[in-house]
Image (tube, rainbow, N blue to C red):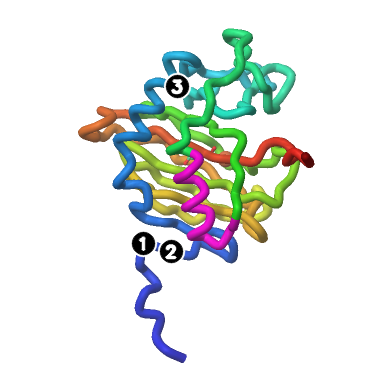
Amino acid sequence: MLPDLFADDRTKLALDPGAWLLGGFALGEASALLAEIARTAQAAPFRHLETRSGGTMSVAMTNCGAAGWVSDRRGYRYTEDDPLSGRRWPAMPPCFRDLARRAAETAGFRNFEPDACLINRYAPGSRLSLHQDRDEARHDAPIVSVSLGVPARFLWGGRERSDRPRRHDLFHGDVVVWGGPARLTFHGIDTLRAAHHAETGDLRFNLTFRRARLPDLA
Ligand code: SIN
Ligand code: FE2
């Protein structure tokens, strides 16, 4: 067998079958993405959602797209309207959809049609504990996750919550795609450490693109 010279190549690093870290994939468009996040947040402000158990998430969230992910005392689900305003979530900017489709394709998932984009904002001390993304109607579409701003430590686990997670640093412009056999892998973000980024100050933003609802049959 040939030696795997590119085993540590971050431009396309296999995390598991069906899961790829695409290092710097979104770097060239990162500023445009941040501008669209700011615009989205004017219509649908970042908020700290309540969990079913009555806690408050340390990560602030908002959404764009036809469906948005929310959490409250009733549990987790997707909604068409922003519960804060009663209006539809802001539309998904075309550059978001385009990036998500290109990243999915690069990871081997053709014709990804995201209808939801969850936007996470992490301040120092924020964390997202290990979880599966399983509130979507079907699990045949991948998840595309875009990192912006200060670096974070991504926890990449297994199919069971108890599987010991591996840790990968995610930097501004990195994209992670997981689907197929990796679609329900447990993942999370370690407590964000204080750091500075020229474009976001001490914040990290993350976009996760999902197919939340059944594709229209028409
Ligand atoms: C998520 O799992 O929804 C977000 C992951 C991240 O912030 O990188
Ligand atoms: Fe997730």
**Outermost residue toward the left in this view:** 198
Estimate the spatial distance between the alpha carbons at disc 2 and disc 1, rounded to whole Å. 5 Å
* Residue 162 visible in this rendered orientation of the protein: no
Question: Which amino acid type is shown beneath numbered disc 3?
Answer: Thr
**Residue 138 screen position, x and y as percent:** 74, 44
Q: Are marks 3 and 2 in contact (CB under 8 Å)?
A: no
**Residue 190 shown left or right of residue 161 in the figure:** left
Ligand 1 near label 1 (Cβ, under 8 Å)? no
Question: Which amino acid type is shown beneath numbered disc 1?
Answer: Arg
Q: Which residue is mark 3?
A: 40
Q: Which residue is mark 2?
A: 13
* Residue 200 visible in this rendered orientation of the protein: yes
**Residue 96 screen position, x and y as percent:** 46, 38
Q: Tell me what residue is drawn at x 35 percent, y 31 percent.
A: 34
Secondary-structure class at tag 2: strand
What segment carries the magenta color? 97-110
Estimate the spatial distance between the alpha carbons at disc 3 and disc 2, rounded to whole Å. 31 Å
Secondary-structure class at tag 1: helix
Which quarter of the rendered picture does the C terminus lie within?
Answer: top right
Of mark 3 and mark 1, the one earlier in the sequence is 1
Estimate the spatial distance between the alpha carbons at disc 3 and disc 1, rounded to whole Å. 30 Å
- Reply above or below: 80 against 183: above
Q: Which residue is mark 1?
A: 10
- Report the front residue among 185 and 146: 146
**Residue 202 shown left or right of residue 113 in the figure:** left
**Residue 134 shown left or right of residue 178 in the figure:** right
Of mark 3 and mark 2, the one earlier in the sequence is 2
Label 2 Cα neighbours within 10 Å, binned few <14 / some 14-19 / many ≥20: some
**Residue 121 screen position, x and y as percent:** 43, 28
Question: Which amino acid type is shown beneath numbered disc 2?
Answer: Leu
Q: Are marks 2 and 1 in contact (CB under 8 Å)?
A: yes
